Amino acid sequence: MANNDWDLDDLLDFHFDREVPERNKNQNSIEKTAEPPKAAKPASGRGLGDDFGAYDDLKKYEELRRESKKSSAPSFDVPEPLSNHKWIDDNDIFAQYDKSYAASQAPRRAPVEEPDDHPHLHGAKEIEAIKQASQEAYDRYRSNYTKKKKKEKKRTGRGRVSGFHRVLTTIYLIAFAVFAAAMIYMDVLPLGMAAALFGVLILLSLVILIQTRKRSIKKWGKVLATMAAMVLIVFYGVGTAYALGTLSFLNDTSVKNEKAVADIRRDPFNFIITGIDVDGKIDEEGRSDVNMVVTVNPKTNQILMTSIPRDYEIYMPDHDNAMDKLTHTGFYGVQSTIGAEEQLFDTTVNYYVKVNFTTVERFIDAVGGVDVVSEYEFTPVKLKEWTVKEGLNHMNGKQALAFARERKAFLTGDNQRIKNQQLVFEALIKKATSSRTMIMSYNKVLSNLRDYFEMSFSSRESRRLVKYQLAKNPDWKIFKNTVVGGDGSMPTYSTGGAYAYVMTQDAESIENAKTLMNAVLEGKELQTDEEGVVTVVSGE
């Protein structure tokens, strides 16, 4: 116990791989402090008043060492770590060494909580605090996660564009392109109307493409855009079908014409309507029971309808000016009818429209019937189960045809029939020029008339007339005139020289018809007096 060399060596026997720190200037003070106190040799007995406290301390120190050795695991002597002494400084390097060694040799045990004054209350509060902290942590996590996802969607888009919307927009663009090409080629829309239509459609198309193809668009926006795209696809399909159907109809029913005017929207012209008294397709020939010269002036918006009785006396230039009844010219074709009427009125017929019974009936049914004001009440011979009322009558195709063909119910016979034909034709014009009627029944009209209609208006001229009607929407003034004549019996060309009933020409009536036709062609205004007689406005 004279010094601490043996204590340090014994301690280092367990850690041969460690390097022992060199002595420093504090080492001597540590050894002196750690060395147990030495008992001084008593010079005399207690009675002399000597102090034996150091001896008592040494004895206590030895007893503590023996108890420590008995409870220690190693079989060899291990001095008590110097750090156990209250006078050893914790900052001393040897004290730190002793503490680290003790920690490495101690068995691992669960941490012991410090005692609490109220353990049962502390535990409940702690559990509740843990739960609350856990919920708050979860809420913060979900909030941060949601914010992160929103930022990612905002940066990269709300989601992928579905395959359905890709296909839908592709179909939409194709349908729009085909519709636009068909409408441009058809050329029936005025410039202002076409610009407005395509401007709106292009704007809608851009909105639809943005709403359906952009990823950041909300769900309701995509739904509305999808519905709009489907509706417009149907619209494009119907519009394209109408355009292509119209072009096909006009091409199929138009024939070559060398007498066409330069611009049908500005130049006045004549055309005839010839009605053949047969059912079936238009290529079947028959008697021309309906004969009307229609004079049109687009600048003054006037239409003059000049009707000619079916039995009227005419001469056919293509048959060496042979005389016959006008109705018989239908057996020789429409050009024979045109030549006879041109010679009769000394005018040029620029176009013709050829129809038959089936055409009239199908056309009127396609537009939903016509409203005709009858002068008399009668029962037609061709439709005895129906009675015409005096005044307004709504007629279907079959009824209108029976009304226009009737002559035996009237004292004036064919003259009244001509008037009735004019009434039906006038009602049909009004119904056909109604934009709503043609829009709703257009396709039906075309399909019903394809095989029962023929004209010399070209496809382009017909489309120009439609375009003119849409652009100007003129209020057409319609006038009606009829050529009259006398009764006679004469040998005709079609009967081989045999006598037949013929309505002889009336020079005054023919001259009046020529005057009215020329007035319309020259742009003069017509008027109708109280008796229904058409005259030229004075001063024109």
Image (spheres, rainbow, N blue to C red):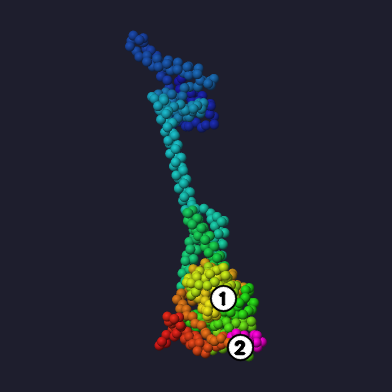
Mark on residue 110? none
Mark on residue 405? 1
Residue that protrudes farthest toward the front in the picture: 411
Label 1 residue SS: helix
Disc 1 residue crowd, few under 14, some 14–19, many 20+, Cα 10 Å: many
> For the magenta stretch, what is the residue range?
491-502
Q: Identify which residue is drawn at 62% across, 75% down.
A: 278
> Which of marks 1 and 2 precedes in the sequence?
1
Residue 249 visible somewhere in the drawing: no
Label 2 residue SS: strand
**Residue 218 at what x, y percent from top left?**
47, 54
Task: Give the quarter of the figure containing the C terminus.
Answer: bottom left
Q: Are marks 2 and 1 in contact (CB under 8 Å)?
A: no
- Judge by depth and name the residue closer to the eye, 241 or 116: 241
Q: Is residue 271 magenta?
A: no
Q: Amino acid at mark 1?
A: Arg
**Residue 452 at what x, y percent from top left?**
60, 74
Labels in figure, total: 2
Q: Identify which residue is drawn at 61% across, 77% down.
A: 277
Quadrant assignment, res 113: top left
Instruction: Kindly identify which residue carries mark 2.
Output: 490
**Residue 337 at what x, y percent from top left?**
59, 84
